[in-house]
Image (spheres, grey):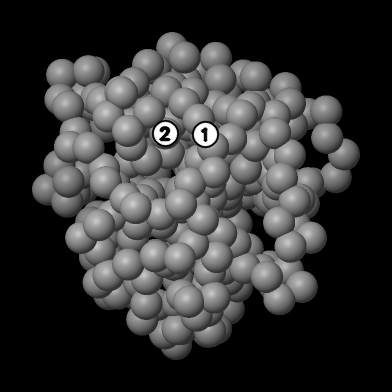
Amino acid sequence: MSLMFRGKEIFKPLNTGRIDERVACVREWVANIFFYTKNGATIMIDAGYNYARLGEKMRWLDIDPAAVRYILITHQDTDHVGALERDSELLFRNATVYLSEIENRYLTGETRRRVIYGLYKLPMVKTDNQRTLLRDGQILEIDGIRIECILVPGHTWGHMVYLIDDEYLFTGDTLWFGADGGYSFISTLAEDNKLSVRSLAALEENLKKRTGKIKIITGHTGWTDDLAFAFRHRTELCSPFKRRMHDPAAPYDGYDESDDTEENARGARLAKQVDHAGKR
């Protein structure tokens, strides 16, 4: 993966740190995992890679892995569930995992994950955590935290995004932010790109009905509270082969974590995405 995307200006993950007082972020190579904390309760959104430095980086944010009892999974790709796999450190062995009932079919083996336009079959992910299966439109309340579950298939068949407390939307791999706005996520990694585009249209319409600003937080390319920016190119695919869609602000090698440090994590807040014209 590192060699495939090096110099492509594709991945630009947030470094470890905090977006605001409720949302903390850990960077794991090119992916981000998030922690939402309110009234002393913490919910984890996605579980990253099987990553040796996860516990260390959580300590930078003063988050104890043992205190995490609930994990929302957008989809089961290994850069989003690695810390739950049987051969991981099992930091979250006692946590309950929430994911869509459709996405769970990958974990049971009923469906196999395919990428590169369906040509390559990925290994089956195996995890022993207790699971709670979710439906589209379902509302959860966990320790006073409201979670709305929205099915957005395309990248995977059961990909789900989560709107928390009507203010924070965690999108996993549905959106990719370029320099000039959001696109449908990386084309070579989708189960069905046409379905991804239709799902983004439905998601945008859903969000337009809401009042107040929503922070739209992606799994690989940062966040914004500008709805128009987030969906500006929703009918277009992020392609590794189309240079104009890439972002010159992205690092040459997204897997180089040399600028992700404890000092930075405890310092300034993580800035939102800025568009090509410098607007926020």
Name the residue located 39 percent from the left edge and 17 percent from the top edge: 193
State whether residue 201 is above or below residue 211: above
Q: Position of residue 256 (x, y in %)?
A: 24, 65
Q: CA distance from mark 2 to mark 1?
A: 6 Å
State whether residue 162 is above or below residue 34: above
Compared across the picture, whether 171 is left or right of 12 comes to right
Q: Position of residue 200 (x, y in %)?
A: 57, 23
Compared across the picture, whether 255 is left or right of 187 comes to left
Compared across the picture, whether 245 is left or right of 40 comes to left
Q: Is residue 170 visible?
A: yes
Circle on res. 104: 2
- Residue 189, located in which quarter of the rendered image? top left
Amino acid type of the residue tagged 1 in the rendering? Ser
Q: Is residue 271 visible?
A: no
> Looking at this rendering, what residue extends furthest in the bottom direction?
263
Amino acid type of the residue tagged 2 in the rendering? Asn
Q: Position of residue 147 (x, y in %)?
A: 70, 47
Compared across the picture, whether 229 is left or right of 40 comes to left
Name the residue located 17 percent from the left edge and 46 percent from the top edge: 1
Question: Toward the viewer: 238 or 146?
Answer: 146
> Looking at this rendering, what residue extends furthest in the right direction?
211
CB atoms of marks 2 and 1 within 8 Å = yes
